[in-house]
Image: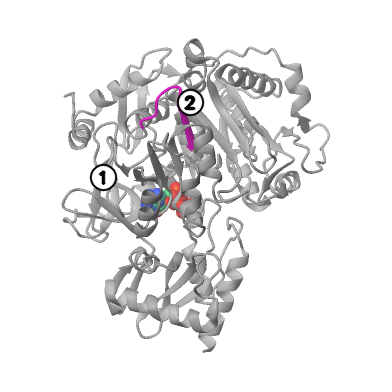
């Protein structure tokens, strides 16, 4: 059915001729042994992509480029925390990965064994992930900012033979020791790893447990000339497990395959990100998140691009750091999160103009709704397309966006875009399971089979995979994203928030996202969260929390009261009085997960005087105290 010239046709092709479409995409990677079947869907909703094919993620990302660009940059490490900046060529990266793989083998790690990484953003983390991929071990990266309790539950779930960690990381100039948390976690967990491999950065003291803990550097020297061959894996073997962010409660262990993931990423690099070999990709995410897996570690290198590994924050040493790196490394594709851009928006806009960002082709943002004011601010500042990506840990790559490699569809402010090829996206009525019409709100659902790259199952829990994702909408077995969406008549889809983030005010169902959009359109507001709080008369009322931009506003109590009035008037005007929050509290920051997602559930719990739950995933617990105080005063008043 090729050639497709519009995104719509391309999408159509992927749905009506699934096998043909993905057979074509599978050519983007190297297969050691060709697959026998594109898709085995004999046990819905489980998918087995590229059955019988043998390949390897490490080979495709590194070895394959050695012939043509061995001495070109592959990994660019920048730490604004320690001042270290170092570039590894494909050849050097290849050597480091083989050293790490040899160490793993010496420590008894082989095909199918789990290796858990609890690491800061350092090159050794990249070596370790690729070493796993090379020898067929399964990595499970746990975000380095998690405390021992969260780490322990993930150790128990993954059951790793080996844990790779370091003495510490740094954030905003502060050393964060890792080893004490790791020791505590192993103490707490019922599963015990055989070994812990430790990278000593000289940042924090590190106690070693004899027999279990081993140092990386002497072993690296021992295996300096190591040559570890690639282990060819059947496409459906497990490449890794990764936990969802935990915004809505207990994180789920997403399990991913090898071949389907490699094909999905290679295809997205071509059609969505439009990155070319020899160029540089910069994703400011963390290796602990799915964006880090797909678009720091694997995606860019699969396309022969260099990838930047950044240890630092967007405002340190100043709010120009991201753009300075774009200029220095001639970055062509950049990936960040709305939350990072909102942090920058709080600062002086002049930073954007200080550096030459003309190498950039586009900036991609994902992870949270991209509100219009933020989108407009960054689009105008950069003078480049800013492309919203909507996806989940579960899917591994975008569900909704625009694909400029297929067609130059203009992005539409406030919408992540259109259903991507491979995803049969429908908006369904929560109660009836029927499709809703244009401009009507529905649950964003995907008619299975899910495309390559998406989760195979929940790690060690097929039942949970089916019951969590495929059994919540009446009628048919469809995958639920648990997000609300609405589609305009041109096919652009808008995300209205999570299905459990809906407020019911006197019988009116309001998405918190809509109210938040309205509040952030006030020029003094940088960020905000709205939650529904139970009310004896109205059922629920909307309570808003706003963080101000760095303007002169909000410094006195009088001005804060005035601001609150202005914001309420604005919401009245844009959405109607029913959406008006009962209070708009001005606070210094919002409680967010470490990946930058607002924890509306915790805010709501505090407002209703309930226990906010497990807070170990919160970035800055101090802001919860502010919310507690603010709401206590308002209740008293
Ligand atoms: P958990 O599933 O454990 O509650 P989580 O859903 O926050 O955590 P992720 O997989 O990291 O974990 O996040 C995916 C979710 O993030 C999406 O379902 C959606 O709610 C939100 N999201 C991601 N990208 C966008 C976007 N571009 N626009 C709006 N929302 C987005
Ligand atoms: Mg989720």
Q: State which region is magenta.
A: 274-282
Magenta segment's dominant SS is loop
Mark sitting earlier along the chain (1/2) = 2
Foreground: 284 or 608? 284
In the displayed structure, 305 sits above or below 401; it is above
Q: In the rendered structure, does residue 334 fall within the stretch colored magenta?
A: no
Which residue is the site of mark 2?
A: 301
In x, y percent, where is residue 195?
Answer: 73, 32
In x, y percent, where is residue 171?
Answer: 66, 49
Neighbourhood count class around disc 1 (C-alpha, 10 Å): few under 14, some 14–19, many 20 upward = many
In x, y percent, where is residue 343?
Answer: 51, 56
Foreground: 278 or 111? 278
The mark closer to the camera, 1 or 2, is 2
Whether ligand 1 has any atom under 8 Å from the Cβ at mark 2 is answered as no
Residue at image position (64%, 21%) is 96
Residue at image position (61%, 36%) is 78
Split into 4 quadrants, where in the image is the N terminus? Answer: top left
Describe residue 275's horizontal placement relative to residue 94 as left or right.
Answer: left
Residue at image position (29%, 36%) is 403
Dots 1, 2 in contact, CB < 8 A: no
Specify whether residue 284 is in view.
no
The picture quadrant where one finds residue 82 is top right
Q: In the rendered structure, does residue 279 fall within the stretch colored magenta?
A: yes
Q: Secondary structure at mark 2?
A: helix
In the displayed structure, 588 sits above or below 32; it is below
Tell me the CA gap for discs 1 and 2: 29 Å
Foreground: 97 or 317? 317
Outermost residue on the bottom side: it is 637
Specify whether residue 629 is in view.
yes
In x, y percent, where is residue 33?
Answer: 40, 12
Mark number, residue 425: 1
């Amino acid at each position: 059915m090729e050639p497709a010239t519009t995104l719509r046709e391309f999408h159509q092709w992927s749905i009506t001729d699934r096998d043909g479409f993905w057979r074509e995409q599978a050519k983007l990677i190297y297969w050691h042994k060709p697959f026998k079947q594109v898709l085995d869907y004999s046990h819905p909703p489980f998918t087995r992509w590229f059955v019988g094919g043998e390949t390897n993620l490490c080979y495709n990302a590194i070895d394959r480029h050695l012939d043509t660009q061995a001495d070109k940059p592959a990994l660019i490490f920048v730490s604004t925390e320690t001042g270290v900046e170092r570039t590894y060529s494909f050849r050097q990266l290849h050597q480091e990965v083989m050293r790490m793989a040899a160490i793993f083998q010496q420590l008894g790690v082989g095909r199918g064994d789990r290796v858990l990484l609890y690491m800061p953003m350092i090159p050794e983390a990249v070596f370790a992930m690729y070493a796993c991929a090379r020898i067929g071990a399964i990595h499970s990266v746990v975000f380095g900012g998690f405390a021992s309790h969260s780490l322990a539950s993930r150790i128990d779930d993954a059951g790793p033979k080996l844990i790779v960690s370091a003495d510490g990381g740094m954030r905003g100039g502060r050393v964060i020791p890792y080893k004490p948390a790791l020791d505590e976690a192993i103490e707490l967990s019922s599963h015990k790893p055989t070994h812990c491999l430790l990278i000593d950065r000289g940042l924090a003291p590190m106690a070693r447990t004899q027999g279990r803990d081993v140092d990386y550097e002497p072993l690296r020297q021992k295996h300096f000339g190591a040559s570890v061959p690639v282990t060819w894996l059947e496409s459906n073997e497990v490449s890794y497990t990764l936990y969802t962010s935990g915004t809505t409660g207990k994180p789920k262990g997403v399990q991913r395959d090898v071949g389907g993931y490699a094909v999905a990423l290679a295809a997205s690099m071509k059609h969505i990100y439009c990155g070319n070999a020899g160029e540089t990709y910069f994703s400011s995410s963390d290796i602990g998140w799915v964006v880090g897996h797909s678009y720091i570690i694997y995606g860019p290198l699969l396309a022969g691009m260099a990838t930047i590994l950044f240890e630092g924050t967007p405002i340190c040493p100043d709010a120009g750091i991201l753009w300075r790196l774009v200029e220095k490394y001639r970055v062509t594709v950049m990936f960040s999160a709305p939350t990072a851009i909102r942090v920058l928006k709080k600062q002086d806009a002049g930073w954007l103009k200080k550096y030459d960002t003309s190498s950039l082709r586009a900036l991609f943002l994902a992870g949270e709704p991209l509100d219009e004011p933020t989108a407009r601010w960054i689009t105008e500042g950069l003078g480049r397309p800013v492309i919203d990506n909507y996806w989940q840990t579960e899917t591994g790559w975008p569900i909704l966006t625009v694909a400029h490699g297929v067609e130059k569809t203009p992005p539409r402010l406030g919408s992540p875009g259109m259903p991507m090829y491979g995803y049969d996206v429908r908006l369904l009525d929560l109660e009836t399971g029927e499709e809703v019409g244009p401009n009507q709100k529905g649950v964003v659902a995907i008619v299975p089979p899910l495309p390559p790259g998406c989760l195979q199952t929940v790690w060690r829990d097929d039942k949970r995979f089916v019951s969590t994702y495929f059994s919540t909408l009446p009628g048919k077995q469809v995958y639920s994203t648990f997000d609300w969406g609405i589609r305009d008549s041109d096919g652009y889809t808008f995300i209205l928030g999570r299905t459990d983030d809906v407020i019911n005010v006197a019988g009116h169902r309001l998405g918190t996202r809509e109210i938040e959009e309205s509040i952030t359109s006030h020029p003094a507001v940088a960020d905000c969260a709205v939650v529904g709080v139970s009310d004896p008369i109205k059922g629920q009322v909307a309570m808003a929390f706003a963080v101000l931009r760095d303007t002169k506003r909000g410094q006195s109590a009088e001005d804060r009261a005035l601001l609150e009035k202005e914001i309420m008037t604005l919401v009245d005007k844009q959405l109607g009085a029913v959406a008006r929050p009962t209070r708009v509290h001005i606070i210094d920051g919002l409680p967010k997960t470490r990946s930058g997602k607002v924890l509306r559930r915790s805010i709501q719990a505090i407002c209703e005087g309930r226990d906010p739950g497990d807070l170990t995933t919160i970035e800055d617990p101090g802001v919860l105290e502010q919310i507690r105080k603010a709401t206590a005063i308002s209740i008293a008043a």
